[in-house]
Image (spheres, helix red, strand yellow):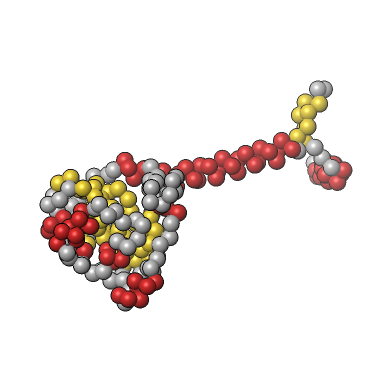
């Protein structure tokens, strides 16, 4: 849910959640099978030319990145009206349908959050992807799906390693069953510990 005022105006408070947020997105522009979450983008030349990021130019800066969709309503409206400032097109965007970018949170000049929406009516927006720009570096925020799957894979790997270590220290004999392999030093230490325990009892 987003409930804040951004450069496009007020984002409706009844934005619906999208299942697309749960799965990682891939793009042809970034190469076959390449996820945009692996990209860090920055344009020092643009930042120097325009004196850094501000609320009135951050979307223009973002439009230079590989995260931008040239078929979005923002891009189409800019071409049709020849507006150089993408931030002042709130009224016209609300009358369109399709992909739309909006600044949904800002703490200038260090942090800006840009959200990609799918607009189906003047009052209905569905969030698709979230991007953040911190100190001029733009990233695509990872999806919940990718975060959970990465954590699960990491946990499974650690469990497998633990089982491998345990298996390497175990041995089996038909008469005694399974037991732990011990070096001479380990056996001596275990015997000494048992002896001390018996003396205490």
The C terminus sits in image quarter = top right
Residue at 29% x, 61% y: name it: 63
Residue at 17% x, 48% y: name it: 97
Horizontal side, residue 152 vs residue 85: left or right:
right
Q: Nearer the viewer, residue 45 or 99?
A: 45
Where does residue 24 sit, x and y in percent of width and height?
40, 45
Q: Name which quarter of the figure residue 93 lies in.
A: bottom left
Residue at 34% x, 66% y: name it: 111
Where does residue 186 sit, x and y in percent of width and height?
83, 44
Where does residue 190 sit, x and y in percent of width and height?
82, 43
Res. 195 in view: no
Horizontal side, residue 24 vs residue 50: left or right:
right
Q: Name which quarter of the figure residue 171 lies in.
A: top right
Res. 158 in view: yes
Horizontal side, residue 181 vs residue 30: left or right:
right
Residue at 19% x, 60% y: name it: 79
How many labels sit on residues?
A: 0
Q: Nearer the viewer, residue 84 or 116?
A: 84
Q: Name which quarter of the figure residue 87 lies in.
A: bottom left
Q: Is residue 143 above or below residue 109?
A: above
Q: Nearer the viewer, residue 118 or 146?
A: 118
Q: Is residue 79 above or below residue 44?
A: above
Judged from this view, the residue extending furthest toward the top is 174
Where does residue 80 sit, x and y in percent of width and height?
15, 59
């Amino acid at each position: 849910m987003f409930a804040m005022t951004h450069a496009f105006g007020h984002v409706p408070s009844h934005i619906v959640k999208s299942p697309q947020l749960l799965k990682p997105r891939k793009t042809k522009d970034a190469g076959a099978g390449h996820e945009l979450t692996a990209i860090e983008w920055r344009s020092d030349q643009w930042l120097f030319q325009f004196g850094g990021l501000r609320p009135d130019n951050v979307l223009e800066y973002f439009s230079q990145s590989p995260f931008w969709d040239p078929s979005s309503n923002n891009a189409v409206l800019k071409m049709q009206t020849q507006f150089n400032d993408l931030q002042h097109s709130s009224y016209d965007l609300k009358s369109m349908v399709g992909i739309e970018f909006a600044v949904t949170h800002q703490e200038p000049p260090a942090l800006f959050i840009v959200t990609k929406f799918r607009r189906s009516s003047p009052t209905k927006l569905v969030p698709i992807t979230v991007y953040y720009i911190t100190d001029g570096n733009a990233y695509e925020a990872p999806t919940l799906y990718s975060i959970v799957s990465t954590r699960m894979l990491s946990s499974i790997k650690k469990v497998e390693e633990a089982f491998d270590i345990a298996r390497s220290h175990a041995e089996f004999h038909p008469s005694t069953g399974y037991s732990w392999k011990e070096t001479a030093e380990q056996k001596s230490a275990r015997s000494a510990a048992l002896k001390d325990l018996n003396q205490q009892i």
